[in-house]
Image (cartoon, rainbow, N blue to C red):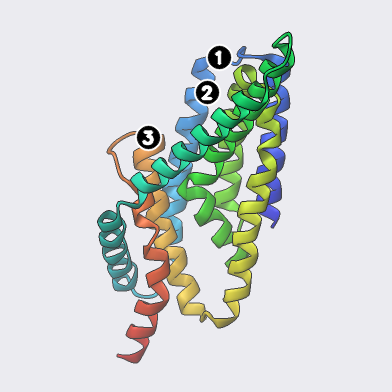
Amino acid sequence: MTGSLLNAGAIVVGGLLGLLLGSRLPEKMKQSVLLILGIFTLLYGIQMFLETENALIPLLSILAGVMVGEWVDLETRLKKLASIWEERFSSSTKNSSISNDGTHGFSQNRLMQGFITTSLIYCSGPMSILGAIQNGLTGDISTLTVKSILDGFASLAFASSLGVGVVFSSIPVLVYQGSIAIFAGQIQRVLTTSMINELTAVGGIILVSLAISSFLEIKTVRTVNLLPALLLVPFFTWLFELI
């Protein structure tokens, strides 16, 4: 839960700063921060991969996982689901927030729009799932720390245009990531040390792909479609232990 608390706190701080400072943060500074975070994520992903005891296990897990992810088109489905939820909440808010002078209605609609939009953004990415699993299994919050910095800067930017609703998006982030971390902590009891090491290695590959695609923008990778690999790691580890 520590990483999730840190993430939620970063969103609150970033959102409050955004309300105070508006959009005064220089664009060059934002770009430099993202670049440094991208380089760190790349190197940290490589370090995680080196935890593997047998490189064939993460290789087979990633290959099988991406095949499953591409087959069901997981990334597109998640994006569509997020869009549907955003449209539904936005339309219901518009219908319910009309008042006589329109001022209160506009304020409430803006609050809900900021809350819904940023909640979906912060909860739908691969770092959210991967970081929470890593935190629950090993207690390592490095991935969620990087995500916290990213979300903090994003909240600063969003709050200047979407208002205080951005600050409240910290609540679903805490509940969502915290639940995943708690669940991961429970299944840790049935996972061997080798399985956890291979899960770490596969997580490293996913982080490298995220750095290459989202931060450094070297090559587009549908990173979300790699996530099924995490479910396959225990099976391949068990299989190799039998051989």
Residue 78 placement (x, y as % from top left): 41, 47
Residue 45 sits above or below residue 163 on the image? below
Q: Are marks 1 and 3 in contact (CB under 8 Å)?
A: no
Q: CA distance from mark 1 to mark 3?
A: 19 Å
Residue 107 placement (x, y as % from top left): 70, 18
Q: Mark 1 sits on what residue?
A: 26
Residue 83 placement (x, y as % from top left): 45, 36
Q: Are marks 1 and 2 in contact (CB under 8 Å)?
A: yes
> Would residue 91 be found to the left or right of residue 126 on screen?
right
Image quarter hosting the N terminus:
bottom right
Residue 242 sits above or below residue 117 on the image? below
> Would residue 165 be found to the left or right of residue 68 on screen?
right
Q: Which mark is first along the chain, 3 or 1?
A: 1
Q: Mark 3 sits on what residue?
A: 216
Residue located at (58% from left, 68% from top): 184
Q: What's the amino acid at mark 2?
A: Lys
- Observer-nearest of 124 and 206: 124
Q: Mark 2 sits on what residue?
A: 30
- Observer-nearest of 136 and 143: 136
SS class, disc 1:
loop
Badge 2 density bin: few <14, some 14–19, many ≥20, Cα 10 Å:
some
Q: What's the amino acid at mark 3?
A: Leu
Q: What's the amino acid at mark 1?
A: Pro
Residue 130 sits above or below residue 233 on the image? above
